[in-house]
Image (cartoon, helix red, strand yellow):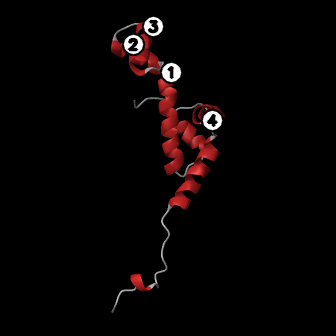
Amino acid sequence: MKNRAKPTWLADLVAAAGTSQFHFSRAFHAATGRSPYQYLIARRIEHAKVLLMTADVDLATVANRCGFNSAHQFAAMFKRHAGVGPKRFRLSRTTRAVRQAPAISDPTTPELVHPL
């Protein structure tokens, strides 16, 4: 969904489906196990996780890119869904990546020195 942050997203989906909001929401929940709103929030949080792990941007930028109204709203929703705040999530992923990175051998060790 390209326009996840658009305020009229549900009305647009309902109009595209050609049904009432009530019936659309019931069918959506039956198909996905979530309400449209729950699905949207879950997608936003997943997108935020990717940004937190890969982009070097501040939390306000992540919040904006994921369709949240503010960094505060984003942080609260992220913590509710991910179990940790976005800052701690980013730090734990960065620390884990550094710990899991393969050790670089000393380039002067015999197995890495190329004969001339």
Q: Marks 1 and 3, how far apart in space?
A: 13 Å
Amino acid found under the numbered disc labelled 4 = Lys
**Dot placed on the residue nearer the N-terminal end, 1 or 3:** 3
Q: CA distance from mark 3 to mark 4?
A: 30 Å
Q: Mark 2 belongs to which amino acid?
A: Ala
Which residue occupies the extreme front position in the image? 111
The crowding category of the residue bearing disc 4, from other C-alpha atoms within 10 Å (few below 14, some 14 to 19, many at least 20), is: some
Whether the residues at callouts 1 and 2 have beta carbons within 8 Å, the answer is no
The residue under the point 56% across, 42% down is 61
Nearer mark to the viewer, of 3 and 4: 4
First of labels 3, 2 by sequence position:
3
What x and y, as percent, mark residue 25? 44, 13
Q: What residue would you read off at disc 2? A: 27
Q: Which residue is mark 4?
A: 79
Q: Between marks 1 and 4, how big is the CA–CA gap?
A: 17 Å
Say whether disc 1 or disc 2 marks the residue closer to the N-terminus: 2
Residue linked to disc 3? 22
Image depth: mark 3 or mark 2 in front: 2
In the picture of the structure, the residue carrying the numbered disc 1 is 37
